[in-house]
Amino acid sequence: LFAELDDIPLDPHYALKEDFSADPSPSKVILGSGIYRDKNGKPWILPAVKEAEEIVKSSEDSGRYDYLPIPGYAPFYTAARDLLFGSLSSPEDNFVSVQTISGTGANSLGAHFLSEALKPSAVWLSNPSWVNHANIWKSVGVPVRSYPYWDPERKALDFEDMIQIISQEATPGDVIVLHGCAHNPTGLDPTKDQWRTIANLCESRGLFPFFDCAYQGFASGNLDEDAWALRHFTSRGSMELAVAQSFSKNMGLYGERVGALHFLTASPDAARKVKGHLLRLQRGLISQPPKRGAKIATTILKDNALFPKWLADLREMSSRIKCMRQALYDELISLGTPGNWDHILTQIGMFSYTGLSPEQVECMRTDGHVYILSSGRISVAGLNNANVKHVAQAIDKACRK
Ligand code: PLP
Ligand code: TYF
């Protein structure tokens, strides 16, 4: 029955991890998936999360393993919504929120719903985008198109081409996926003026904006500033939109799968209908989302003493990443590595899109035992004082071949 199926290559992130694990070199380094590591290269449980775990534990009773309702834990998805949208600029009844299996589940539930409800002729993804976006949209049968984003010559945002292609080729009712902040993989976000132009375009062309917010707090270090683009769209009062939200990175709750999907609709009646469809789809896909991580996140979001501690944890992560950008840049400059490396400093968030070619990436692996994705993206959060020189030397060598 299955012998005629296509062979599917392993997801590049997992393939990289397997190759890395099989490498016996003591100096090997992996800068693949976007997972925060501390200054010793170890996973980091946020101190605010540790405190929240204790609070959750002390309030647990024999019902702790009961199911949540289908939309999830209401105190979680309303607090999560408020973190994104701030003080709501539209009536609360126009919003719909559902707890999901982290950001991936939010993207997926949103794609299932939008494919049915809007029947878009295409979904528009940035080129490049998070590897899973195309996978998710293809699986719901929506043709995937891409809009220009990264200009490899200038190592900058290709804004003019982005606007031109979307204006010329997107059709009303199409979905456009926009990274809320700290674009993965390029680390390049539009300016505020550019966001205004994108919002104008979505409005004039009748495109449905689907924001993916997996890094709130990682771009500027300020949660409100990182939600600026989304809030600009909502403040116009004229657009319906969706947002996929993840707490994997900003709370370090990766494996707990904590996230939410939100819709801003034009009326309470529309919101009620959207909610019905989301719950029907959620029932078929996962029945109910998991409880524990949502309780931890809610405790942090709603506890006046813990919330500022979380902000301090976020600042610790984002400032260590910034220091590592500087350290890598300084090493490359002191080695006199051919090329311009300013983009390592100016890109934001967890990643740097280095501009290294697949051949150079391969050379870093074979000669330097440094493992990065073939796109040239590095997870800056994987750098530390003990490995940054070695990584710079591997880049240097690859650039001189
Ligand atoms: N969207 C983007 C842009 C991402 O980079 C990620 C991964 O980190 C996600 C969504 C979803 O991650 P998770 O499912 O862990 O929330
Ligand atoms: O881009 C990253 O590194 C993170 C982690 O299928 C990730 O988003 C990578 C691949 C994937 C799911 C998560």
Image (cartoon, helix red, strand yellow):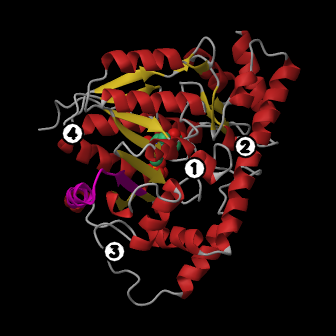
Identify the residue shown where x is 50% and y is 61%.
82
**Kind of residue at disc 1:** Gln
Nearer the observer, disc 2 or disc 4?
A: 4
Q: Residues within 10 Å of mark 2 (few under 14, many from 20)?
A: many
Point out the tag, 4 or 3, that comes first from the N-terminus: 3
**Is disc 1 placed on a helix, strand or loop?**
loop
Determine which quarter of the picture holds residue 48.
bottom right
**Kind of residue at disc 2:** Ile
Percent coordinates x, y for residue 370 in the rendering: 66, 31
**Kind of residue at disc 3:** Leu
Point out the tag, 2 or 4, that comes first from the N-terminus: 4
* Magenta segment: 260-278
Q: Residues within 10 Å of mark 3 (few under 14, many from 20)?
A: some
Nearer the observer, disc 4 or disc 3?
A: 4
Q: Which mark is residue 321?
A: 2
Which residue in the protein does label 3 denote?
Answer: 68
**Kind of residue at disc 4:** Leu
Whole-number angstrom distance, CA of label 2 to CA of label 1:
15 Å
Whole-number angstrom distance, CA of label 2 to CA of label 3:
36 Å
- Say if 230 sits above or below 38 in the image: above
Q: Is residue 263 magenta?
A: yes
Determine which quarter of the picture holds residue 32.
top right
Residues at marks 2 and 3 touching, judged by CB atoms closer than 8 Å: no
Q: Is residue 318 magenta?
A: no
Q: Which mark is residue 118?
A: 4
Point out the tag, 3 or 1, that comes first from the N-terminus: 3
Which residue in the protein does label 1 denote?
Answer: 216
Percent coordinates x, y for residue 4 in the rendering: 16, 30
